[in-house]
Amino acid sequence: MTDEMITAGIDVGAKFAKVVILKDGQVLARAKTLMGFDLLKSASDVFEMALKDAGLSRGDIQRVVATGMGGNAILQRPQINADETVSGVVAGAAGAFQVVPTVRTVIDVGAEEGRGIKVEGGKVKDFVINERCAAGAGTFIEAMARALEVKVEDMGPLSLKSVNAIPMNAQCCVFAESEVVSLIHSKVSKEDVSKAIHDAIAGRISSMVLRIGVEKDVVLIGGCALNPGFLPPLEKELHTSIIVPEFPEFVSALGAAVIAANPQR
Amino acid sequence: MTSAVEVKEYPSEPLKCWEQAKSLRKNYYEDYLHAHEKGGLRWAGGAWSFSSIPAGLGEDVYCITGEPYGATVAFFKDFAAKCHDATEAAGFPRTLCAYMRNYWGSILLDKYILTDGTVVDGYPAPDFIWQDHICCSHGKWYQLVKWLEKKRGKEVPMYCVDVSVGYPSDFSPEEDYKVNYVVEQLSDGIDWLEKATGRKYNDALLCDAVWNEIKSTSLWAEICALNQAVPAPLDEKSMYSLYVMGTLMKHRPECVAFYEMLTDEVKDRIKRGVAAVSTERFRVITDTQPPWGFLRIFREMEKYGVVSVGSLYTHGLIGMWQYQPDGTWTPKPIPPIKPQTREEALQTIVRWTLHKPEWAHFYQPELKTKMMDSIVKQWKVNAVLLHYNRGCEGLSVHIAENRLGLLNSGIPVFPFEGNMGDERDFDLAGTMARLTAFFESMGLKKLKK
């Protein structure tokens, strides 16, 4: 990393935009905001928030790297003027390696996608991403929360109150929602349904990750890592302990900032 | 990664024989359409059928091979969508072979599509069906064609050859029964062809056709072998338009002549250092049929300096190969003597055809992995892109095992889901995003224009 270099990583996700500003490997600021309809405005707003928090202006940032599904949209555009984009896979691996240098497997579950990444020295060795259906991603839990008429942030704690295992299809978000409605009509408790939902998504993610092989240390990142109901079934399915770093939803933005600091990597 | 980098460029130029390739293919479909106007016969069957056998009925016998027609339909996505709708409305599930559904849909719509996208009213029914059975759909495909044609008022006789005798490692006398099993079916088939068409069979034409088929399929392998050169003189997207001649008319002299011309041109490109992709710096191979409606993924790959130099599918669907004692995979040379009699012709073509690499899928996933591994090494390939093709169970069977086998050999593999003939099963944006991530993980950046 170049001495005294200040860089920024911005992860323009499906649900949130996240920014990390980095100086010599130390985080100066983090900021996140809900994505609005105007992608560029949301990204610009959160970037401004981070700059303000760090007491910096755009001119102080030597390089900005964008990632996430909207990363390309902010490439060399006003306000942010990102220098390059990297895929969420590469950013997630770099970020996870920064926070857990012993990482070999990254599981990244955001709003839109679930990914498994095999990592060696911070570099991607192999990866797998859920195909099309959001059943392997955070959107799935949101949709199910609506069906259950509970707040999405209550889903995890609710599931932890259940000790029953109810099988549920998580290959298709739409079918799963029908299944939830059927369970509600069958007078199954919200706790049990919530656990079934978390078990289902954990099952789907784990079967996907097993395709690339699971080696310790395993690190869970992305917004779903904040959900306390998701970790236990995932550990159970993968038969391994999983590390959830601090600020897991910022890890890809952190990775982008690390990559920005190493343009010749 | 989108921060662009500069890279040395090779000279590049279009293929000189490109127009000839287009013309041959166009004429092929039009000849089938207009065969009756010229007093000729039409037959239908798969691209792997023993097409040199019906050639003994005369020089005015024209065929349409099912898979290439299904692929042509797939390329024109609007027409393909209508074919799918018609097939599903007729009660067939969308999980069946996509080529087959395109083909059936075309009959159900009573419309025939030409290579330039022109849709002609009235699907031209065949006079007979000459098919072989190797994959899970082949035999059933034409049983249904026969049934569909009967519903349209035409009785179409059908003959199907079972080739499920395995993939012989060599032809020791102990394996003669495998060869003879197929030869006997073809021999009976010739009698059947005479009865079905009322024509007298000509053994001299059969011998010529067999010899043409052997030369075509050996030549195509030679052309693919030339692509080991760096830079690659051919890219796979172009090769799709070239191998297709072997799937349409491998038994015809036009096919031999075209491949002889192409061989010379490819040799000349190598001599002059002409690249298919001027920015080549990373070589991949693919597997199975591509999603035909989305060939632009190859153009996207070029933005990273990535060239696909072929695949087991492109090399081995028609091309014939063999392993040398030193372990290298090389084009199978043509036999020393042209067959002179019916029996010699049938023995020769069966012994030749049972070596088809793409038939190995159906028996031995390990052999397929071995051949892919050989291509990676000999063609200097950096990574393999595996199309988990929902549209073709036959060629996709064991593909996940092939992935594991390649990974165990230390070869990077990128799998993606799709469908060769049904665009509803392919996510272009998602696939491109994943492909970009894969190229980034390989250390590639987008190139400056």
Image (cartoon, rainbow, N blue to C red):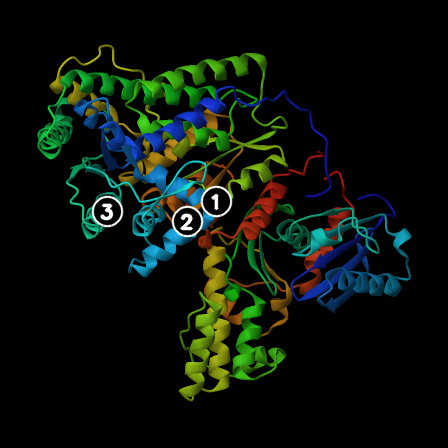
Q: Is residue B214 visible?
A: yes
Q: Earlier in the sequence, mark 1 or mark 2?
A: 2
| Chain to which the residue tagged by mark 3 belongs | B
Marks 1 and 2 in Cβ contact (< 8 Å): yes
* Horizontal side, residue B168 vs residue B312: left or right: left
- Name the residue nearer the viewer: B135 or A199: B135
Q: Nearer the viewer, residue B327 or A151?
A: A151
Instruction: From the viewer's perspective, tell me whether residue B304 is left or right of residue B229.
Output: right
Q: CA distance from mark 1 to mark 2?
A: 9 Å
- Residue type at numbered disc 2: Ala
The residue at which mark 1 appears reads as B293
Cα–Cα span, label 3 and label 2 = 17 Å
Check disc 3 and report its element: helix, strand or loop.
helix
Q: Amino acid at mark 1?
A: Gly
Where does residue B267 sit, x and y in percent of width and height? 49, 14
Residue picked out by circle 2: B80
Which of disc 1 and disc 3 is earlier in sequence?
A: 3
Lateral position of residue A142 relative to residue B337, left or right: right
Residue carrying label 3: B145
